[in-house]
Amino acid sequence: MQTLKSQSGPESAPFVKWAGGKTQLLAKLDAQIPQFTRYFEPFLGGGALFFHLSSSRSQFSAQLSDANRELVNSYNVVKHDVEQLIDVLERHEKNYRRAPAEYYYRLRSAQPVSDVESAARFIALNKTCYNGLYRVNRSGTFNVPIGRYRNPAICDKDQLRRANAALRYSEARLTACDYKQALRKARAGDFVYLDPPFNPLSATAHFVDYTRNGFGEKDQIELAQVFRELDRKGCKVLLSNSSTKLTRELYRGWEKSRVRVVRAISCKASSRSGYCELLVRNYAL
């Protein structure tokens, strides 16, 4: 099997990783990738690891999913209608540059009438909102203010086309669903990468509202149970999370390593260093 020739690393992903700092982990993650032919990523986000694998591994089939329906729709549009998407994004970029704040808030309150329009809105807001942050309120409404950017690249045609090539090459199946539902089809020998909303480092560090339901301590405990179920099925599972007392306890007995990353989601530059991320796996290298 051939390796995808276009350079579809994390920089080719059309979205920013909401949790921040993921691209710093790729060297560490790459050293822990097992042999596989089927890949599951049920917390897709920016898809940094998927795009990295697409550019550095032999061809594989990918089962990609996320609970965020707008995100999954955007990936599907990138896969199936990338040229039409580029046309709409170019229009957004042109209008944004004429009047950034006015156009941003008009776009934020807009209600798209097609999948392509919805994907273009989602990507444009991600490229221009505060810190590339994705957050919704309890009604499911995106409510992040405009970011401070001089000249954001709303429409990166090369990036979008590389993402399209990676998604097509892997015959990626993209599904909007809960991670438990996505993993029901995982079987022995499949490689599963779990990258959930992180367990907060402190009581004031809660940022888990990627969907209207959030992802709290109970969800972290249930995820650890799913990790064990996948292990019993013979899946090869790699998980990344914050290194907290809870996560270290939940994954006691598994192979663990820690890596320091920059947390780009923080609004304070002084808070963007010295963050330990926990990697957990159930297989030998």
Image: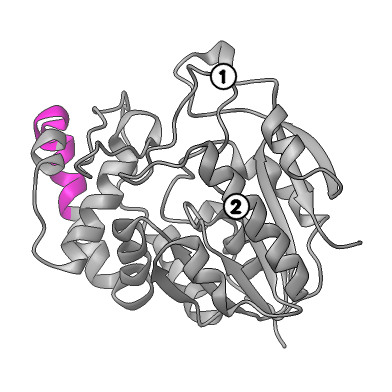
Q: Looking at the rendering, which quadrant does residue 276 occupy?
A: top right
What secondary structure is found at the residue carrying circle 1?
Answer: loop
Q: In this picture, which residue range is highlighted in magenta?
A: 91-103
Residue 55 vertical position relative to residue 108 in the rendered view, above or below = below
Residue 75 vertical position relative to residue 260 in the rendered view, above or below = below
Query: Which residue was labeled with disc 2?
Result: 223
- Quarter of the picture holding the N terminus: bottom right
- Quarter of the picture holding the C terminus: bottom right
- Foreground residue, 102 or 133? 133
Task: Please give the name of the residue rendered at 31% of the width and 52% of the height, measured from the top-left corner.
Answer: 155
Q: Looking at the rendering, which quadrant does residue 108 occupy?
A: top left
Residue 90 vertical position relative to residue 184 in the rendered view, above or below = above
Give residue 219's position: percent from left, percent from top.
52, 46
Outermost residue to the right: 285
- Foreground residue, 63 or 60? 63
Q: How would you rate the neighbour count of disc 1 (Cα within 10 Å): few for under 14, some for 14-19, many for 20 or more?
A: few
Q: Is residue 30 magenta?
A: no
What secondary structure is found at the residue carrying circle 2?
Answer: helix
Q: How would you rate the neighbour count of disc 2 (Cα within 10 Å): few for under 14, some for 14-19, many for 20 or more?
A: some
Q: Nearer the viewer, mark 1 or mark 2?
A: 2
Amino acid residing under circle 2:
Leu
Task: Please give the name of the residue rendered at 11% of the width and 58% of the height, measured from the top-left corner.
Answer: 112
Does any portion of residue 195 appear in the rendered image? no
Give residue 270's position: percent from left, percent from top.
58, 11
Query: Which residue was labeled with disc 1?
Result: 202
Separation of marks 1 and 2 at Cα, in angstroms: 20 Å
Q: Is residue 99 magenta?
A: yes
Does any portion of residue 126 appear in the rendered image? yes
Amino acid residing under circle 1:
Ser
Task: Please give the name of the residue rendered at 49% of the width and 45% of the height, measured from the top-left corner.
Answer: 17
- Foreground residue, 177 or 155? 177
